[in-house]
Amino acid sequence: MNIRGILLVFYLMSMAGFLWSQHSALNDEFNSPCNLSNWQNITQIEGWMTPGGQPAEHLEEHDISFTYPGELYMMPWTSSWYANWRGVLLFKEISGNFIVTTHITVTQRDGDALPPSSDYSLAGLMIRTPTGIFNPINGGPSGIQNYIFAAMGRATSSTQFQLEIKTTRNGASMLGIQNIGAGNNDIYMRMVRKDSVVVVLSSEDNLNWRLRERFLRPDFPDTVQMGFVTYTDWDNVSAVGWQEQNNNILNNNYDARPWDPDLIGRFEFARFEALNLDSLYENENFMILDTSTIRTLFDHSSVPIYPAGSKIWSGISSNDWTDPGNWHGGLPGTGDHVVIPNCSCSNVNSLFINADTPVLAGFHLEEGANMEISPAVTLQVDLQNPGSAFVNQGNITNYGTILINNALGRDVATLSSLNNQPGAQLIIEE
């Protein structure tokens, strides 16, 4: 194995290690169907079952980067979150203080960008206290729901999109509704946890953020569930009651009433950040801190760790780098940044580089990605542009050559596995 610039590699790897915290490890750009297994489903975790012994799953359909490439897609049956009602939640556990941001798009079930046809049909972010229950019957214990969510869609208006922001404590819910306009079926949503305070912000352009609500929740434990909710068709939900909803799937197999679930929630990413505050604000009470300061602290754009317009491997056709059917956005060309997402499931083929690549501007293997480079083949990445990076969070088996130019001062990191076989070369040049 031939390795040049080895001291530079060690230096850059040590620097890059600071970039990958517990929070960033939770991030998901929703580039691969395989990532769905990284999200916990409340139905399964808490063991909600129908009287017939089937999971009481309130999601009719959901996937990642299959129905909508690059997005988490959720389409619920009739269900809701309110008081003792338990709805849909896909989540990850997170501890301490944090910031989480997503981009939400809401449509009707037929895909029309109009407010849904049924009241309280929305999609959004939720922070929730784990209940610790498993396989509850008869709706489960009352008073166990403790959460905050911020969702967009239709609350009570049939003519314009709205926000519903709800806090529930021991099964007692208080909600607020805010109008966001008739043509705005997408929004950026952000939640900040600072000790016992939860702050909710939104933005229409990912540039200018508006403080929507803040809540004092000293009852939240250090480790919470943080994730995505969808819910719809409140009129039928409320008629059924929470005990029946929680332990049943409300559709025509349940009974023949005119069910009206009408929501598709789509989420473009989940980006978790550590809450790093200037010492001036560490001891501030965020419940009384003025709005302008809140905006100053959290009025920043949410950006991925790789550039917009990156060429993303789908692997749906074969394992061949040169097959255009394996890429979102077409085959990578000179100057492109390439992303290889998780391919640890049957839906996605691992990448096989069987021909010299163009000179790429950046390369990123996400966790769970697998890649093999053939003998006598070169993967070349030139990091001359600011922000360029070569990051491996997956697994590379190299029989050929990896050539990284202009690496000094750039992020070059192998955080998982790089197996250079006999005759392989890893060349990193300043």
Image: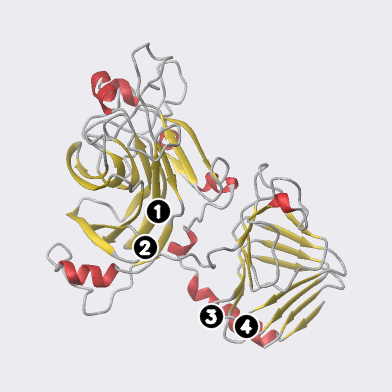
Q: Is residue 269 left or right of residue 423?
A: left
Q: Which residue is mark 3?
A: 15
Q: Looking at the rendered structure, which numbered label has been put on residue 217?
A: none
Q: Which residue is mark 4?
A: 384
Which mark is first along the chain, 2 or 3?
3
* Residues at circles 1 and 3 in contact by the CB criterion of under 8 Å: no
- SS type, badge 2: loop
Q: Does 212 sit left or right of 111 as displayed?
A: left
**Is residue 34 positioned above or below 394 on the image?**
above
> Which sits earlier in the primary sequence, circle 3 or circle 4?
3
User: Which residue is identified by label 2?
Assistant: 206
**Rendering coords of residue 323 (x, y %):** 76, 53
Q: Is residue 106 visible?
A: yes
Count neighbours of disc 1 (C-alpha within 10 A) and say few if under 14, some if 14 to 19, many if 20 or more.
many
Compare marks 1 and 3 and give the one earlier in the sequence.
3
Query: Could you tell me which residue is drawn at 81 percent across and 68 percent down?
Result: 356
Say which quadrant the C terminus sits in: bottom right
Which residue is depicted at the point 26% across and 47% down? Answer: 181
Kindly identify the residue that appears in the image at 49 percent across and 73 percent down.
19
Secondary element at tag 1: strand
Residues under labels 1 and 2: Cα distance? 9 Å
Q: Nearer the viewer, mark 3 or mark 4?
A: 4
CA–CA distance between discs 1 and 3?
30 Å
Residue 375 sits above or below residue 11 on the image:
above
User: How far separated are the C-alphas under marks 3 and 4?
Assistant: 18 Å
Residue furthest left in the image: 288
